[in-house]
Image (tube, rainbow, N blue to C red):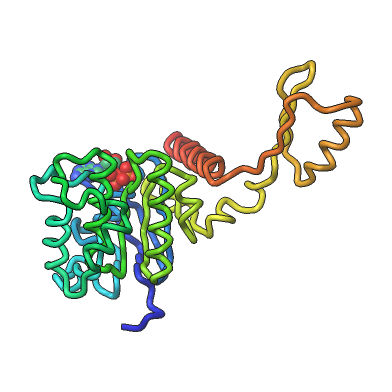
Amino acid sequence: MTTTEAAIRIRGLRKAYGPLVAVDGIDLDVHRGETFALLGPNGAGKSTTIEILEGYRDRTSGDVHVLGVDPSHGGLDWKARMGIVLQSSAEAAQTTVREQLAHFASLYPNPRRVDDVLDAVGLREKAKTRISRLSGGQRRRVDVALGIIGRPELLFLDEPTTGFDPEARREFWGLVRQLKSEGTTILLTTHYLDEAAQLSDRAGVIAGGRLIEVGPVGSIGGADARIPIVRWRDAGGLRERRTAEPAALVAALTAELGGEPSELEVVRPGLEDIYLDLVAAAAASDTKEQAA
Ligand code: ADP
């Protein structure tokens, strides 16, 4: 296996649950060392795709390689190279945080030090606390700690910061950046588009089982999707215009009004606006296809 090989390689992936086609022909490469965000509305097919990659679900057809191995034949040595942080929280175990981490560490050939992981997830002070006594956000950190203790080459993070307060989320972002700087490949799903924009190199949008868009987070949706919007209020109400030259428009407006435009703002659409437009457009074209 060479290091130039993609960490994840998907070709023509399909998964049907009886008559329902949940994943409808996905092609995707996730490069080594990359943080990739998989975005999409509920029911789009994200979990199905990820569970196939993790080896937890069979596929109907298509080729999949994860760390060079077909997940349907992945053995324990292959599993040990991955870290998985599932959506559901850790069991409310009666063991302490440190005991739980030490136990998981013993299952891997080259684990991180328990103390390093406690520091990384901010649970050093809770090391001797039973997991059942932790808050929801703290338990989530235990999930993350268990996902990284084995020093994974590839880390799956499924909605990792759900239930975090803003401060904990910022700290978690720092941890993800640290893992990335150590060379970890990360596949992230999140409903927080700011999180995807902050952490990912590239993102893919899944809707209706298809990958409708993929690209660097800074250019997804194309240049037109990022044309700034100028908003202001005049006697006729709230106005909005899109222009590539917002400064010129604001200058013209100011001259025309003879002063400051009321409630003036210039915004550049962010990943969330662009994502919502992409998903709405995909839903509209599906409706059209069904009607035809
Ligand atoms: P997402 O993770 O994007 O919310 P899922 O992959 O969970 O999407 O689901 C995609 C579609 O497949 C949905 O319509 C869902 O209801 C359906 N689905 C998921 N798992 C099963 C299953 N085990 N049996 C039948 N249908 C399923």
> Which is more toward the observer, 64 or 98?
98
Residue lying at 19% horizontally and 67% vertically, measured from the top left: 79
Residue 286 appears in view: yes
Vertical comparison of 133 with 171: above or below? above
> Which is more toward the observer, 12 or 32?
32
- Residue 187 left/right relative to 202: left
Residue lying at 23% horizontally and 51% vertically, measured from the top left: 142
Vertical comparison of 111 with 155: above or below? below
> Which is more toward the observer, 97 or 142?
97
Residue lying at 24% horizontally and 70% vertically, measured from the top left: 81
- Residue 241 left/right relative to 190: right
Name the outermost residue toward the top.
235
Q: Position of residue 256 (x, y in %)?
A: 90, 28
Residue lying at 13% horizontally and 55% vertically, measured from the top left: 100
Q: Position of residue 285 (x, y in %)?
A: 49, 40
Q: Position of residue 282 (x, y in %)?
A: 48, 42
